[in-house]
Amino acid sequence: MAKIQLSNISHTYNPLDLNPTYALNPFSMTWENGKRYAILGPSGCGKTTMLNIVSGLVKPSKGNVLFDGNDVTNLITEERNIAQVFQFPVIYNTMTVYDNLAFPLKCRDFSKEKIEERVKSVSDTLRLSSFLNMPARKLTADQKQLISLGRGLVREDVAAVLMDEPLTVIDPDLKFRLRRNLKEINEQYKTTLVYVTHDQNEAMTFADNIIVMDQGEIVQVGLPKDLFERPKTTFVGYFIGSPAMNLFETQLSSNNSVKINDTIIKTSTNLSKLKNNNLKLGIRSEFVKVAKDESENLVEVIIQKIEDFGNFKLLTASMGSLTIKSKVNRETEIPAQNVKLYFPADKCCVYEDNKLV
Amino acid sequence: MEKLYKILKYTFITLWTVFIVAPFLWAVSTSFKDFQSVNSKVTYIPWLDFEPTLEGWRVLVKSPARGGVDIVEPYFNSIFVTCTASLISIVLGTLAAYALSRFTFKAGFVRNNDITFFFISQRIMPPIVLSIPFFIFLSTIGLLDSLLGLVVVYIVLLMPIAVWIMVDFFNRVPKELDETALIDGCNPYQAFYKVVLPNSIPGLIVAGMFCIIFGWIDFFFAFILTFTEVQLLPVKVVALNSSITPWWSLSASALISVAPLIIVAFVVERYLSKGNLSGALK
């Protein structure tokens, strides 16, 4: 267990080019001991590169990696004491399940009793106990992934367990249970867990802190609530949440209000320093309501579609060429004509050049 | 329609089997014939058509002094040279292939693929191109007409095959396997021999099989690089021929020349059909 610091890290896979393209642009970050982190972002945004830099499989082009303040940038993977689980199960085909789980401990010369105790504990947690003497290659894909996971968890003293979309091949029911297991393991052993995923629900339910990445940049680090309510960029707003955040081109109207078409929308943000270029207004569909007796921040719309999801209704409405989505309670009455939607001022986010003001 | 397909299938298989097996049966029957049974009229079935004799086989183990051609010593020479050269080629070739598969090499315009091609190109050349250089090389270091010299030459011939097969095999073993081993606490050497190598046994067997086949059947280099001290089986079998072609002992020697390869084929086929070759990694 260790506090992991990444300081001024950047990485390119073609360092000899004159204008190398960077898989990771310079950033610094600290992962506190014993916490759960999720790295979230679309494919090819640099998530895996970041993990490989921490585990030592990739040496960063620039910057340093520190474990508890010690610089480990030049240490090879073997010396870093880190566990990593890959997207697809990697097992040692020629060994039994027991030997697979025991391998990381055997490599580090643990005593036989200790190995037995740890393998038993991990195999119980992952429900692999009844397979211990079977050849690992005979197991199903998700059982194999459990073995990969088990090899990551079998050492108690690891600096961190890094997981690269580990539950992709596992069926949904087991996925849910495993996420809970991982949380329990984290709470019990205080292991730092870093979890890469492109599934926002997985990230939201699993992590204390979410790191959102896009095109080699860290876009936002924060609690699930922050990411949801105050996305720092339009990308985060778009990427997180289902449906994506409503985003409209807008013009500045006054110090605290903007104009969509001809409708004035008040916000709780001070807009006095804006230069009025490339402004966008963003609001989550969860916060857009059907107006009752509100007198301002109202938008007159035509309802295009109402989808019933059982626990909520999703309205798709249009105002001129703009489309607005709103998630409302099942019970909400939706008038047939003259529908007005209400945008609460404190939930309206204004973006200048796609960055939150 | 299905029935027709079945009939055609089995007809084809039967014809093919006859095509493959017939020469062997012919050789077996001929090896038990004497001069009379071969040269008078066409005969097929022992005891009915002709009186079987072991003369063809006896000649092979009798010393020349007693009118035989003793192929026992060349037989063991061939086994020694083939096995030693194959083993060394597999060891060196596997190491080279692993390096070529996992690390990036750059030397001027030369890249990994060029190096792999360089190995294969050794087999593209007609062997005769190499005969004079090999002859001069072995005579310079005093290994002409010796087993060790042949082993050296055969390593040159067999290693490209090992490298070629193993590069392809290692390329299909996911990089994550090595990485997992590193994360689990192996150093790069341990990762290779504790994890990657045991997973590559099917590849090693295929490469080994090809090395043994190509080593065992080589006639050309065995012929030009040996004279009196050392002889290998293919050379000796050819030397059996004389003014009167001894069909019976030629058949017998052909059969025992093929025997080791048939045994290798059976062993390997068994191992491969266990399904160990299929990528069980994902």
Image (cartoon, coloured by chain):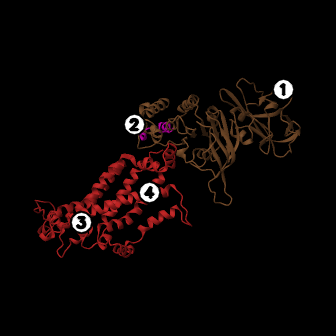
Chain colours: A brown, B red
Cα gap from disc 1 to disc 4, whole angstroms: 76 Å
Task: Answer whether labels 4 and 3 touch (C-beta < 8 Å).
Answer: no
**Closer to us: mark 3 or mark 1?**
3
Instruction: Specify which label sits upstream in the sequence, 4 or 3.
Output: 3
On the same chain, marks 3 and 1? The answer is: no
Q: Secondary structure at mark 1?
A: loop
Which of the 4 image quadrants contains residue B152? bottom left
**Closer to us: mark 2 or mark 4?**
4
Q: Chain of mark 3?
A: B
Cα gap from disc 2 to disc 3, whole angstroms: 47 Å
Instruction: Specify which label sits upstream in the sequence, 2 or 1.
Output: 2
Residue drawn at point x = 41 percent, y = 48 percent: B198
Q: Which residue is mark 3?
A: B74
Q: Amino acid at mark 2?
A: Met
The outermost residue toward the right is A254
Q: Amino acid at mark 3?
A: Pro
Q: Secondary structure at mark 3?
A: helix
Task: Answer whether labels 2 and 1 touch (C-beta < 8 Å).
Answer: no
